Amino acid sequence: MSLADMRRVIDPDTYFDHNSPPTNLQWAHDQVDEFVKRQSPDQRIVLVTSGGTTVPLENNTVRFVDNFSAGTRGSSSAEQFLAMGYAVVFLYREQSLQPFNRHYSHNSKGLLSYLERGSDGQIRVKPEWEQQLGRDLDLYQKFTGEGKLLMLNFTTLSDYLFLLREVSLLVASLGPRVMFYLAAAVSDFFIPSHSMSEHKIQSAAGDLTLRMNQVPKFLGPLVKNWVPLCFIVSFKLETDPELLGPKARHALEKYGHQVVIANMLDTRKQKVWLFTKNEAICPAAIEISKEDLDAGKDIEQDLVVELARRHQQYISDAK
Ligand code: PMT
């Protein structure tokens, strides 16, 4: 990297001085504060991040660059963590998949195809959907009602980073019983607010050339300064299979956290690898068959069971 390029890498510590916080920051702060106080002293807590961040091209945003993620990994994992007794803070991209809702919100059917009007004129769920929908509704109401599921939403990279830092600082003192499960797809490039066009970029000027700055990797400050005692799981997404192992190992060495889950874009629903300090050369693989996948099984069921086991060990070792 040239000196000029290095200058363009924004320091994580100063990022927050140069970007505006999201409008829901104070609300999120209060919600998380209350959520944490409501939990019993030995309650395991997980922050699940989910969905992709956007980076706006204009301050009055008409256009933005998006990061790929439907939110399947995060929302499915959140359900599994809840089933295993965790309290879950779900930090998700607005309009991406949400726990329990995910089966109905983003498929080709649409809400109306689950409903019908009965002979009494009342609208009701079609009988063939009653069982599944009833189960998801019950679970959703149970976990939110018991104060075990808290949902916070973000849209832009900046929203995400402010909220991630806020939640981190609020749970840091709880130490090893908190897991960070960073499944969100986070932008690597952005345009700082002061370099952005104020209004909609005009097409009259012809072709558009974009110059974007590198986003600092926030895993560094997260692991070292924000939540040094928590159990941290990050993800590594690649499309080139040659890069996946080396980059997962590199992340582990660079940040020194507990687990890097490596996945390939095209097989992410069927296979992931768990890289840890002791399994950097031979990572454990978690895989489900095509038949299981087609039958509706989510890989996150096995993945979360394995992570919860490792997290428990981490908690015991810390005592
Ligand atoms: O939602 P789905 O459709 O189910 O897809 C799930 C997924 C493929 C998005 C998910 O499994 C996944 O891999 N998420 C991480 C994607 C990602 O951001 O990968 P990365 O290799 O660019 O970043 C690696 C890690 O660095 C991530 O944990 C990220 O949180 C972190 N990061 C990234 C950018 C940045 N500026 N700062 C960071 O700390």
Image (cartoon, rainbow, N blue to C red):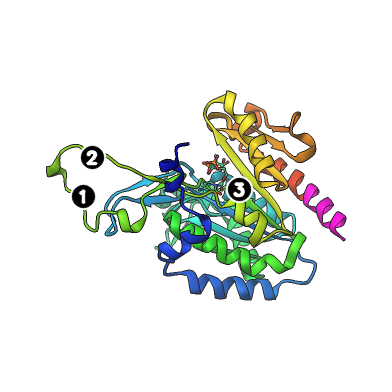
In this rendering, position of residue 38 left or right of residue 103: right
Residue 127 seen in render? no
The single residue placed furthest to the front in the displayed view is 3
What residue is disc 1 on?
201
| Helix, strand or loop at mark 3 | helix
Q: CA distance from mark 1 to mark 2?
A: 9 Å
Left or right, 35 with respect to 153, comes to: right
Q: Hey, what amino acid is under mark 2?
A: Leu
Position of 181 relative to 266 (above/below): below
Specify the segment rendered in magenta.
Answer: 309-319
Q: Earlier in the sequence, mark 3 or mark 2?
A: 3
Q: Nearer the viewer, mark 3 or mark 1?
A: 1
What amino acid type is highlighted by mark number 3? Ser
Q: Is residue 187 visible?
A: yes
Asked whether 71 falls inside the magenta stretch, the response is no
**Point 45% across, 69% down: residue:** 24
Residue at which label 2 appears: 208
Q: Residue at x 44, y 47 (%)?
A: 7
- The residue to which callout 3 is attached is 76
Q: Nearer the viewer, residue 139 or 150?
A: 150
Image location (x, y in percent) of residue 147: 65, 70
Q: Are marks 1 and 2 in contact (CB under 8 Å)?
A: yes
Residue 71 picture location, percent across and down = 52, 47
Give the class, few, some or many, for how many residues have Cα within 10 Å of label 2's Cα (few <14, many ≥20): few
Q: 200 or 194: nearer the eye?
A: 194
Three-letter amino acid code at the position of disc 1: Ile
